[in-house]
Image (tube, grey):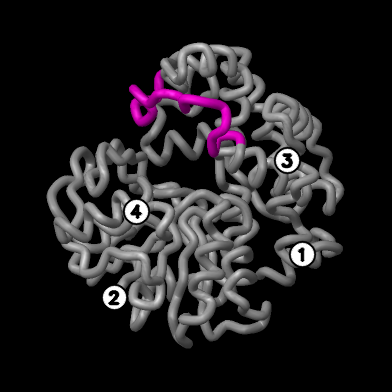
Amino acid sequence: MKVAVLGSGNGGCAVAFDFASHGHVVNLFDFEAFPETIAAVSASGGIVAAGDMEGFAPVEYAGHSIATAIDGADLLLAVGPAYSTAPFGEACRPYLQSGQVAIVCPSSCGGALAFKAAAGLAPDDFSVVVADTSTLPYAVRLVEPGKIHVFLKVKSGVSLAALPATSTARVLAMVADVYPTWAEARNVLFTALSNGNPVIHPAVTITNAAQIERTGGDLLFYEEGVTKSVGRLMEAVDRERAAIGEALGLRIRSDPDLGHEQGYMSEPTYYPGYMKAPGFKGIKSQSQLDHRYFNEDVGYGLVFLHSLGKQIGVPTPTMDALLHVASTMMGRDYLAEGARTMETLGLAGYSATELVHLLG
């Protein structure tokens, strides 16, 4: 199978390595603003991995031409933070070919819907099937351009949903050799709500902001950043997320419960589960607050959850408080910016029942 991976960050390199090591022909694309890894992979002809995945995997093409990267590809994987989804969709728009399948990995917050809209595909246009996943299936870091360390490849607890939902099984079959344990999700609302990053990152960042700024990130994000009170804050956010899911007829598991199944955590608790989690051991905090833990997980994730909850009548007071505090700390208004809302996804005005019927 010919696979185009869009995004040369931590996750993109892990996905490209994994598919290439399973014998697929892989192209790697990123925008010209991110040249280092593309240049390194192009020069070496592939990606080097250590840790839970090891070795060298060849990459057929690494470059900045989206037309070249996706031409003739059976499968496209857009791998990156929420704010990369629409740009990837827009870049693909002139070159998408009927019959191709695209996966946004991870969904973050309505990733399949955002990619599809940016790619210019009408809601009822399924010439290109777009899917998304509940999470990135790796704990991974770039150690240098073209070289990754994989702390963990997640073996279970990852789900996928497609647009239309009737295509989910077919998409899962396409990736079964690389991800044999991925589960079929009911719809893309489930995968969006299963993203745990807005539960974890804003709460830990806000409560450890002074230490992050004072030390430039000399803090073990989970081992030192999560205490009993921080765990209670995360749990409150998680309960609101689960309440949104319940209103949509979806059972959203707690983040520590899912993290325990995925292999990150030795026990499914907020505290001391995250603090003692083997899958998070040694991971340092961001070096500054102007980082995706706010800009993505608040500006997209919590904004999306607030917007969805408000539309279907589920209050989100803890999420709203974190939204307000993070906005104040950053000197901006994430909610007013509205980067990812029901309006931007084209889903404004639908009731919970109507959303479930619309998305499967």
Residue corresponding to mark 2: 2
Look at the image and tell me whether residue 226 can be seen: no
Residue 126 or residue 208, whichever sits in front: 208
Are discs 4 and 2 less than 8 Å apart at CB? no
Q: Earlier in the sequence, mark 4 or mark 1?
A: 4
Q: Earlier in the sequence, mark 4 or mark 2?
A: 2
Q: Earlier in the sequence, mark 2 or mark 1?
A: 2
> Distance from label 4 to label 1 (Cα)?
36 Å
Residue corresponding to mark 3: 334
Residue 144, compared with residue 248, is above or below; it is: above
Q: Position of residue 222 (x, y in %)?
A: 46, 22
Among the 4 quarters of the image, the one containing residue 316: top right
> Distance from label 4 to label 3 (Cα)?
29 Å
Residue corresponding to mark 4: 35
Q: Magenta stretch containing residue 308, yes or no?
A: no
Label at residue 347: 1
Horizontally, residue 104 falls left or right of residue 58, namely right
Are discs 4 and 3 less than 8 Å apart at CB? no
**Which secondary structure dominates the residues rendered in magenta?**
loop
